[in-house]
Image (cartoon, coloured by chain):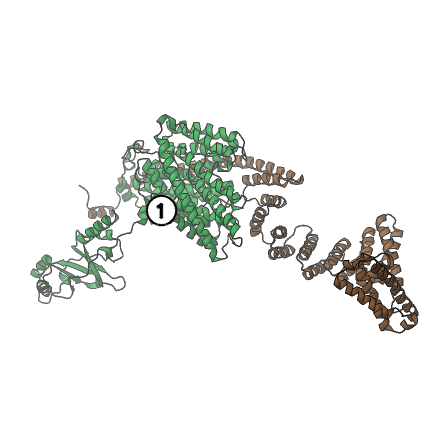
């Protein structure tokens, strides 16, 4: 998806950022981060939140402009309502494709692709850096491409535009690298929320696919930016949802079988789509370099040809057609043909390097497939209460889960697009089936595959989700050491250890906190005893072993082995009750066996 | 050397020096300038976006109105398929516009694309469940989809729903439509109920009463139909043409109910009214009424009313018997035995046997013998019905006797 390959990427470290020097060492600004923290300790957090709002506002405005640009170009180039047989359907995407191809090659090389992987690359490789040139190029070229009828969507570029404005603001204000990396997802979520008019889905998608984790800082910034963007955008476009979805209901639980069939169909369709992209894109990129400037034009001609010869619905984002499909305006075989042609058209457009996204085509394919399956099922089972619209809606979620591999986002997207909670069970069922089928037949998600094709190695957030997290209990050993209380006498402890031939004593001190005392330290303490009844607790240093529970992540033990040779693990219900112990060698052994198990 | 944690913590707790205070002021100033700059940029982009957005909104409105007008012209020229395409184009430029959706739904319904029309109307109905028009459209679509329960439910909702403008008139028409539909399902009793409600709401509207009367006739409720027609007569708003029609209808219903005196009365009133208003009613109607009146008057001369003197009554019975006997003889002579079914042959034989009993009856025997009169009249009725079946429809007095056989006098 990205043509931000290793050879064209901004080089590290900071010199390639918008500023001539790293943010914390600007020639006109002598203060570094620790100094700023000293003189204005709360500045960073407050500025961060305020800037999140500005990022949201600007991202919202830019994405609204972006969408309107596409609409204008669409009307000017293809007419208000394209019909088959119109020659402009051939010439417009071809001519604009030629312009786009040349501009991508010579002016905006980093504007290729959808924008998702570029944003991820910015986050993980380039410290959140997205250049203004890339952002402008993405805006202009994606608008031209989608407006002229290429089978691509505006959501992914909106995400990158939002991330780009966040990066630009962060650089201009000389924020730290750490903050820059946090701002990019906030801008991305804001841009995507405006494009979808679905804030929860946008936030979840960014968390699920871009950053992979969430913390209070990230979530706060992302939510603030998203809300700001949406408030601004809805001042222009209004609050109505993206699709006008007819009423959706589930009156009989046996109908879930019908949706399960849709899940299976969608799973296989997702695999087909992924495989086609996986074959076509590398082949086109293997062609001579000079041809890459012409590929968008050829793609435009082919996609325009599909429209010219009968199916203009596959051109552009296709939102109108999705709306029509939801209202049952097509027969099942027409819907199926539209789904297949959209897969082909999108593969051609995207693989040619034309800037533009895959969200809208994914929703289109899912809606057509869902409506087709629903229509066929209703032919055989007319008593099914679900409308064609409900199947189309579930179909959109199915492709989102199966192709884009964002299952959580796909479920919430169904809510936000329909405003109807009753669809949740069919959505979850169908999406899960599609996700599992797609994952088993195509283990590498499409985003990761496209990144690998570009020569980059970005973290696979799907893989990291699937990884089992190691916990302390995985490395914990049974308690095999002598335990004592703080009231015990040092000499008695020493004698016991000698009798049992042990070299570590676990001492339970006041407050149910533990102290791990090696035999060598005990010998020093015994030597320092001044009275016959002096208890051990009074002679120990003040620090205590940190409280560790079995369910905590295993990596939480690593910071403590410098101080403690052994770490007791306690019970959550009974304070101070030992469950077992863990040593550094136990931890390393556990990691090693886990790694071997995955290899 | 990197400061230790302890020394860093210690340093951070020390009060700021003068240089550090200056630096903080400078930093705050820089941040304020940056935020103001951001605000200015946001406002500038906001203004640009506003004008850009508005430019397209205006253009889109022009386009959508153009497509919508095209669709309306297509509908007006009875080209619903073209109207569907035009309305769809308008809707694609202006999603979620209820009036466009409504127009598209109506065009789809007119183009008999019922499933699509249903989906659109249903989605509109979700937003406005109390809208009478939407419920009516859904009812009509449910009728086409052969879903009677749904159709009746929507009709009822249309009756109780919100109507703008002439709601009473709309509701009246819906009731008639519902009654018509119920009759098509064979649910005449329910249809009668709706029609009576419609009648009750139309007492001041003679044209509507006439429609109700017609439908009540079709719903096998002639007595209520008669009442409806009679209500028209005393209504000052009734036009002469309507009055004449209602009198004709009244006579027709009265005949079907066997109320021949009332039928004659109605037809006489028709004749008087028609004479007063020569331009009202067609010549054909007048002629038909005249013929019917003449026939009824002749029939009235044949019916042995209870109020007649016994001698006259007996004479009429004998006259009927004579007419029927001639009919019987003529029919028996015409039919071939091999063309008659066993049951018909038996009927004829039975009639012949019965005649042997009645054949020697004279007026003297009939006077005062009611049961003999009834028996003879029953024989006459049986003869006319059987011969009509075997030898075709009778004419003349036989036709009148057949009418009497099928609808005995109840006046």
Which percent across, then down, holds residue A299? 43, 31
Q: Which residue is mark 1?
A: A439
Q: Does residue B404 appear to the left or right of A104 in the view shown?
A: right
Which shade is chain B? brown
Residue A599 point in image, percent of width and height? 25, 46
Residue A42, can we see it?
no
Residue in the image at 7% along x and 60% along y: A527
The furthest residue to the top: A290
| Crowding near the residue tagged with mark 1, few <14, some 14–19, many ≥20 C-alpha atoms within 10 Å | some
The residue located at (51%, 48%) in the rendering is A375
Residue A192 left/right relative to A211: right
Residue at the outermost bottom position: B368
Residue at left offset 48%, top offset 52%: A420
- What chain letter is assigned to the residue under label 1? A
Q: Colour of chain A?
A: green
Query: Looking at this rendering, what residue extends furthest in the front direction?
Result: B338
Task: Specify whether residue A555 is in view.
Answer: yes
Task: Locate the N terminus of chain A by quadrant.
Answer: top left
Local SS, label 1: helix
State how many labels appear. Answer: 1
Q: Is residue A401 above or below residue B89?
A: below
Q: Which x, y percent locates residue B308?
A: 90, 68
Between A379 and A254, the one nearer to me in the picture = A379
Which of the 4 quarters of the picture holds residue A152? top left
- Based on the displayed image, in which of its 4 quarters is residue B25 positioned? top left
Residue B359, image x, y percentages: 88, 68
Q: Quadrant of residue A515?
A: bottom left
């Amino acid at each position: 998806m990205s043509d931000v390959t290793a050879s064209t990427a901004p080089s590290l470290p900071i010199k390639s950022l918008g500023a001539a020097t790293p943010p914390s060492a600007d020639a006109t600004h002598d203060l570094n981060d620790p100094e700023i923290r000293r003189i204005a300790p709360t500045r960073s957090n407050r500025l961060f939140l305020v800037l999140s709002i500005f990022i949201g506002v600007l991202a919202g405005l830019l994405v609204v402009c972006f969408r309107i640009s596409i609409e204008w170009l669409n009307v000017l180039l293809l007419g208000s309502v394209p019909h088959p047989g119109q020659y402009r359907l051939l010439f417009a995407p071809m001519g604009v494709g030629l312009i786009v191809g040349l501009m991508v090659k010579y002016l905006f090389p980093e504007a290729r692709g959808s924008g998702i992987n570029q944003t991820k690359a910015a986050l993980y490789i380039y410290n959140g850096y997205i250049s203004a040139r890339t952002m402008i190029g993405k805006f202009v070229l994606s608008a031209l491409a989608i407006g002229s009828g290429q089978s691509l969507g505006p959501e992914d570029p909106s995400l990158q535009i939002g991330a780009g404005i966040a990066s630009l603001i962060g650089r201009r204000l000389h924020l730290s690298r750490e903050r820059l990396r946090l701002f990019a997802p906030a801008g991305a979520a804001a841009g995507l929320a405006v494009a979808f008019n679905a804030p929860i889905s946008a936030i979840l998608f960014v968390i699920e696919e871009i950053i992979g984790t969430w913390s209070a800082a990230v979530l706060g910034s992302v939510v603030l930016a998203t809300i700001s963007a949406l408030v601004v955008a809805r001042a222009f476009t209004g609050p109505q949802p993206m699709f006008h979805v007819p009423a959706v209901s589930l009156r009989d639980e046996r109908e879930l079988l019908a949706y399960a069939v849709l899940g299976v169909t969608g799973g296989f369709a997702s695999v087909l789509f992924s495989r086609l992209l996986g074959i076509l894109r590398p082949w086109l990129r293997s062609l001579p370099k000079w041809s890459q400037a012409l590929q968008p034009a050829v793609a435009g001609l082919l996609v325009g040809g599909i429209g010219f010869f009968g199916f203009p619905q596959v051109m552009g984002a296709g939102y109108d057609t999705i709306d029509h499909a939801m209202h049952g305006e097509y027969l099942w075989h027409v819907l199926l043909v539209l789904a297949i042609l959209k897969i082909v058209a999108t593969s051609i457009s995207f693989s040619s390097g034309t800037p533009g996204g895959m969200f809208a085509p994914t929703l289109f394919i899912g809606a057509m497939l869902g409506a087709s399956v629903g229509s066929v099922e209703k032919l055989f089972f007319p008593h099914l209460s679900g409308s064609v619209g409900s199947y189309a809606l579930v179909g959109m979620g199915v492709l989102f889960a199966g192709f884009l591999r964002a299952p959580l986002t796909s479920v919430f997207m169904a809510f936000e697009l329909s405003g109807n909670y009753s669809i949740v069970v069919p959505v979850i069922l169908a999406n899960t089936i599609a996700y599992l089928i797609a994952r088993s037949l195509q283990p590498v998600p499409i985003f990761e595959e496209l990144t690998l094709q570009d020569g980059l190695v970005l973290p696979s957030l799907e893989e990291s989700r699937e990884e089992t997290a190691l916990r302390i209990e995985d490395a914990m050993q049974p308690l095999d050491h002598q335990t004592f209380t703080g009231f015990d006498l040092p000499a008695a402890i020493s004698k016991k250890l000698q009798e049992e031939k042990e070299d570590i004593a676990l001492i339970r001190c006041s407050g149910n906190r533990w102290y791990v005392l090696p035999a060598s330290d005990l010998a020093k303490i015994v030597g320092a005893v001044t009275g016959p009844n002096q208890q051990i607790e009074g002679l120990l240093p003040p620090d205590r072993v940190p409280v560790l529970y079995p369910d905590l992540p295993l990596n939480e033990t690593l910071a403590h082995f410098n101080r403690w040779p052994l770490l007791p693990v306690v019970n959550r219900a009974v304070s101070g009750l030992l469950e077992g112990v863990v040593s550094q060698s136990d931890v390393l052994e556990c990691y090693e066996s886990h790694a071997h198990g995955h290899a | 050397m990197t400061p230790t944690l302890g020394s860093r913590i210690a340093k951070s707790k020390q009060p700021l020096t003068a240089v550090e205070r200056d630096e903080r002021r400078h930093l705050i100033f820089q941040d304020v300038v940056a935020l103001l700059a951001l605000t200015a940029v946001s406002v500038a982009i906001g203004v640009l976006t506003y004008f850009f957005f508005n430019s397209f909104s205006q253009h889109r409105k022009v386009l959508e109105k153009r497509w919508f007008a095209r669709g309306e012209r297509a509908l007006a020229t009875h080209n619903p398929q073209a109207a569907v395409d035009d309305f769809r184009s308008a809707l694609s430029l202006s999603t979620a516009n209820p009036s466009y959706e409504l127009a598209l739904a109506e065009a789809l319904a007119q183009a008999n694309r019922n499933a699509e029309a249903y989906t659109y109307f249903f989605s509109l109905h979700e937003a406005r469940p109390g809208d009478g028009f939407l419920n009516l459209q859904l009812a009509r679509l449910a009728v086409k989809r052969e879903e009677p329960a749904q159709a009746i439910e929507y009709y009822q909702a249309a009756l109780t729903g919100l109507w703008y403008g002439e709601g009473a008139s709309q509701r009246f028409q819906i009731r008639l439509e519902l009654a018509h539909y119920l009759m098509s399902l064979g649910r005449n009793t329910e249809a009668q109920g709706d029609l009576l409600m419609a009648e009750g709401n139309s007492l001041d509207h003679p044209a509507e009463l006439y429609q109700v009367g017609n439908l009540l006739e079709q719903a096998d409720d002639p007595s209520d139909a008669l009442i409806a027609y009679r209500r028209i007569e005393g209504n000052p708003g009734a036009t002469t043409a309507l009055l004449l029609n209602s009198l004709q209808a009244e006579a027709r219903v009265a005949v079907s109910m066997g109320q021949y005196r009332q039928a004659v009365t109605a037809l006489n009133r028709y004749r008087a009214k028609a004479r007063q208003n020569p331009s009202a009613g067609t010549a054909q109607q007048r002629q038909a009424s005249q013929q019917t009146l003449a026939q009824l008057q002749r029939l009235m001369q044949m019916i042995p009313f209870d109020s007649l003197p016994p001698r006259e009554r007996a004479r009429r019975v004998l006259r009927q018997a004579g007419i029927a006997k001639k009919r019987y003889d003529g029919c028996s002579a015409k039919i071939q035995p091999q063309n008659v079914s066993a049951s018909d042959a038996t009927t004829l034989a039975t009639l012949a046997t019965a005649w042997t009993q009645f054949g020697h009856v004279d007026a003297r025997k009939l006077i005062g013998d009611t049961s003999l009169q009834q028996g003879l009249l029953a024989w006459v009725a049986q003869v006319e019905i059987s011969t009509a079946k075997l030898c075709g429809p009778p004419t003349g007095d036989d036709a009148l006797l057949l009418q009497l056989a099928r609808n005995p006098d109840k006046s």
